[in-house]
Image (cartoon, helix red, strand yellow):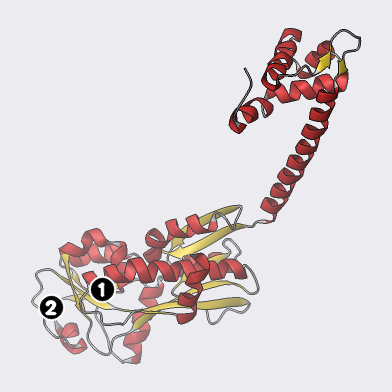
Amino acid sequence: MPLNSRDEIHSVLYSSTLNVFLAVCQYRSFTKAAKVLNLSQSSVSQNIQKLEESLEVLLFDRDVRPITPKPEAIILQELLEKQFFDIEQAVEEIRERNELKPIVKIGVIDSLSSNIAPALIRMLSGQTRQVSVLSGISPNIANDLINKEVDIIITCDSLDGVNGLSRYFLCQEPHLLVLPKKSELVGEKISWQKLINSDLSFVKYSTRSSSGRIAETHFSRMRMTVPSRAEADTTSVVLSMIEDGLGWGLCSPLCLMQCSNKLEKIHIQAAPQPSYTREIYVITRKNEYQPLVESILAQCAFQLKTVLLPEIMKKFSSINNEIVIDNNAIELIDKIK
C-alpha cells in the first residue's frame, strides 16, 4: 500500500529502513549490509521490500551479482545522502551553539529566592547550557561571588568596598514594624522612643545578615541604643520569636512575603519615623554576563511589578508607593516579552 501522507513517508524514511537502504547501495550486497548493520539477511531483505512497496518502485536489480541499484534507487540515494549531510551539519551547528552557551550559577538572597528563582530558571534555560540558583543571606552569596563560586548575585549588599564588580540597582523597599498579635502597641502610632521604652525588646536580625547591618547602621545614625535579647539570621526565625511574644521586629515586605504562612499570626504596621529602606542590586564581576544581567534585571522587575507588588499592597495597607523599582529595569521588561 502506498504512503499517501508526508508523516507516513517520514515514518518509513527516518527509521532503520533508511540505514538499510543506504548500506545496500554502498555494499551492493544484502549479506554485506546485514553484517555491517548487525542484522540478519532476511531483516535487510524485508526492510528493502517494505521501502519498495511504500514507494511502489523496484530499487535494485536482484538478477545480477553484485546487485545493482536502479536509477530510482540512485536518485533516492543521492537525495537522502544530501539530506543526511544537511542534517549532520545542522546537528553540528546546534551542538556548537550549545557549547557556546554558558553554565551560570546565580546567588539570590533568601527573601527573593522562592518568589523569583522559578521564573529566572525558566527564562535563562534558553540562554544557558545550565543554570543553578543558590539562596542564602547577602554576606554568604557576596563571598561566593568574590570567590568565583557563583557568577551573578541578587543581594541587598551593594559591596561598595569591593573593586572589579558591576552593580545594577533593582529596587528599594521600606521596613515595617512587626508586633506580637496581642501587644498593647498594636494599632498605635508609635515613636522610636516609645517602642524602645516598651516592655518588648527588639528581636533583631544578626549582623551576619545585611538586614541586621542595615538596622544597626540606622540606629547608630540616630544615636539610639535599642535593647535586644534575641537575634536570628533568617526572617522565619525572627517572626517565630515575635509570634511567641519575645519582642518586636523590623522586616521588609519582601522578607515578609517569604514567610506568608506566618503573617496571620503577627501584627504588621508602619514603622516609626524616620524609618529606613533596603536596596536590592544585581551584581556580577566587571564585564561578565552583560546580556544575562539585563535578562535577570528584566525578569526580576517583571515579577516585582506584576506579581509581588500587587500582593504586597494587598497585604500591607500601610505601604504607600514606598517600593521603588528601577526605571531602567522596568524598560528592559519588553526584552523578555
Residue in the image at 83% along x and 32% along y = 78
User: Considering depth in this image, is 2 or 268 the residue closer to the camera?
Assistant: 2
SS for dot 1 = helix
Q: In the image, what residue type sits under mark 2?
A: Asp
Q: Is residue 50 above or below residue 282?
A: above
- Where is residue 287 shown, x and y percent of the image? 65, 73
The kind of residue tagged 1 is Met
The residue indicated by pointer 2 is: 199
Nearer to me, 289 or 155: 289
For the residue carrying disc 2, how many other residues have a C-alpha within 10 Å: few (<14), some (14-19), or many (20+)?
A: few
Q: Nearer the viewer, residue 98 or 39?
A: 39
Q: Residue furthest right?
A: 65
Whole-percent x, y for residue 329 in the image: 48, 76
Mark toward the start of the polypeptide (1 vs 2): 2
Whether residue 54 sits left or right of residue 207 in the image: it is right
Residue 311 is situated, as x and y percent measured from the top left of the image, at: 27, 67
What residue do we see at 21% from left, 79% from top? 318
Kindly indicate the quadrant of the structure image that contains residue 180.
Answer: bottom left
Residue position for label 1: 313
How dense is the environment of label 1, judged by Cα within 10 Å: few (below 14), some, or many (20 and up)? some
Decide if residue 90 is in sight here: yes
Is 4 on the left or on the right of 142, as rendered?
right
Question: What is the secondary structure assignment of the residue under circle 2?
Answer: loop
Between circles 1 and 2, the one closer to the viewer is: 1
Residue 144's disc number: none
Residue at screen point 32% across, 71% down: 309
The quarter in which the N terminus is drawn is top right
Vertical comparison of 53 with 201: above or below: above
